[in-house]
Amino acid sequence: MTSPAPPAPATLPLGDDALILSHRLGEWAGHAPVLEEEVALANIALDLLGQARALYAGLSDLLGSEDEIAFLREERAFRNCQLTEQPNGDFAHTIVRQLFFSTYQQPLFAQLSPVLPLAAKAVRETAYHRDHAEQWTLRLGDGTEESHTRTQRAADTLWRYTGELFQPVEGLEVDWPGLAEEWHASIGDVFARAGLTVPAGPSEGAWSAGAGRQGLHTEPFGLLLAEMQHLHRSHPGAAW
Amino acid sequence: MSAEWPLWEVFVRSRRGLSHTHAGSLHAPDAQMALRNARDLFTRRSEGVSLWVVPSDEITASSPDEKDPFFAPAADKPYRHPTFYEVPEGVRNL
Amino acid sequence: MTPVTSPPRGRAAGADGPPDGSGPGLEAEDVQAAFDAAVAADERIEPRDWMPDTYRSTLVRQIAQHAHSEIIGMQPEANWITRAPSLRRKAILMAKVQDEAGHGLYLYGAAETLGTSRDELLDKLHAGRQKYSSIFNYPTLTWADVGAIGWLVDGAAITNQVPLCRCSYGPYARAMVRICKEESFHQRQGYELLLALTRGTEAQRAMAQDAVDRWWWPSLMMFGPPDDESSHSAQSMAWKIKRHSNDELRQRFVDICVPQAEALGVTLPDPELRWNEERGHWDFGAIDWQEFREVLKGNGPCNEQRLHRRRTAHENGAWVREAAAAHAAKHTATHATGHTADHAADRTAADRDDRVEPAAAGPAQPNTAPDTAPDTAPDGAGAPSASRSTRSRA
């Protein structure tokens, strides 16, 4: 309880994670496999956007308004992990990305809740996101041959972006090795129940280990930002 | 075409102290997903504190054709209602 | 003594399913008389009540078109989610598009109480055999279009929908109550969005005016063809599915919009728009019904694109739906999350009665009032209604 609030910039990566993943989930609107899932994905996207805005609000003294933070920074200034910026792919890809991320974000926020006012509410939200992703992972992994193949492929593809999650973020008092251990146990458990194999490939390649946290992103990210920022930037100083 | 997911009826308890009330229906592959879909669809504006989902085809309902045999007999038992009884003026708390 | 029951239906015979015909039979004239009396007395018709086949098919057609409009209507706005110029607007837009999916779900649910499955209705939409509101075949070219849709398209929809909250068919009326309640923010956010533009830079003002110029006339078309060309209207009004005529609602909408446009600082693109003291209404210019018919026929700017995207989403989702169904089939024995409903004592008969009211059925929007399916196809020109023969396909 006596631990001090983390220095402001430390929360920037958390805000960027939430914003960018929310943006990706927003791309699903009108494309979901079933109407019920339109509603579910949008709920998650809205939760994440709310988290981003709350986190940015805490940075306004340093970085300006939430819109300045979101729309006027260059690619290298974004600190989100690369996992969140990965394109949606098919539904399995989106679900596995969400499972990987929410299984990380939930205990992370839980650890930070004493110092971040946002985190208590966010922990509840992320618990639901994780549950949604888990339920779907179980169904897709164990459903049909096709769904199994797609889900395993998604896991294999996204695995390389998971090591970065546990690279310490300067200024955040978090038990990173403990977080990694908890994450691996949880993912291992879900995968086992879903009949999926935990990927064996490297998760900490030279490019992905902490790169996003240092402002080094993957190619699809530039396009995401171009789309997200173009209107705002086309009208300098305008209010919306 | 694959078979359509089954239909579920959703009941929402809007707040503590109230009964669950029928809110509508949705499709889901199984009960767990039905519950989650119901949460997302019917309580996204904080409309509920508890949910039930019931497979639609497991509900047995009275038939409207049986309206009279089912519900008419109750109508001729006015003595079930407090207004049936006369209470002398001035008597309170009864 | 010929027992008369409603036709067999796709939906399981449980809640809101068809009567199973096991009750005492009633004479044909009796059930018709009971139906007529209920409608005349402004009572609601409920799913298990007897109803004329044509009442059923009219409702299925109208509710389906309405539901299709909600989900196709997600597309023009979703087109701007990734480009919304502020985080506040992004959140609002995502929530609004999400609501439209939700409203589609409520409406498909209402249609299902009439014995037509959602899959059947979606198949008809995808095959082009059922229509959706033709307004959604226009493109959203700039950010201001999101505002124009909220203000004008949702405004017209609300004008149409509020009277539907009193529609004679219970499940439809209840769905509409929920929808109108939730939609109250849709129109307002659109108006506010445009207001920010008209109070903004010159470029923003121009963007707003341009959007209003493009959306005004199509919005007026949303009320459907003029009354003298609307073939199904009379019957729908007699059945209290519909409570005001197309022209009546259109006039109401114009009267509402004129002062709003003025406050906004935009010009409605109709040189003939002027106050008629005698009528107490705004006169407006002739609507290009040829354009309406063309768009309806499939020749609008986006008909093909909208339908293609919908079909693609559905087809791309097939493996997901199959996977979940396959998983469920493997685990049918393991039911639910472990919690059965509270307690037997809590499960009163009333809880299971198909006449219980929807939980969120608050009062409808008190403001405007009209009714009829959203612009829908001109009555009669719509797709074939869901008939019993197609129902048995399930």
Image: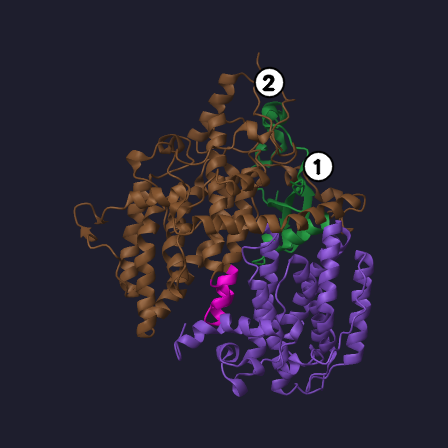
Chain colours: A purple, B green, C brown
Farthest-out residue, top: C1
- x, y (%) of residue A210? 70, 81
Q: Chain of mark 1?
A: B
- x, y (%) of residue C28? 51, 17
Is residue B6 among what the camera can see? yes
User: Residue shown at 60%/76% (left/top)?
Assistant: A16
- SS label for mark 1: helix
- x, y (%) of residue A46? 57, 65
Q: Which residue is mark 1?
A: B58
Q: Could you give the CA–CA distance between mark 1 and mark 2, rounded to whole angstroms? A: 24 Å
User: Residue shown at 69%/77% (left/top)?
Assistant: A113
Quarter holding the C terminus of chain C is: top right
> What amino acid type should be assigned to the residue bearing mark 2?
Gly
Is C280 on the left-hand or right-hand side of C161? left
Is C128 on the left-hand or right-hand side of C264? right
- SS label for mark 2: loop
**Magenta-tinted stretch:** C80-95
* Quadrant in the picture for residue A212: bottom right
Callout 2: few (<14), some (14-19), or many (20+) C-alpha neighbours within 10 Å?
some
User: Residue shown at 65%/81% (left/top)?
Assistant: A213
* Quadrant in the picture for residue A120: bottom right
> What amino acid type should be assigned to the residue bearing mark 1?
Glu
- x, y (%) of residue C94? 52, 62
Q: Which residue is mark 2?
A: C25
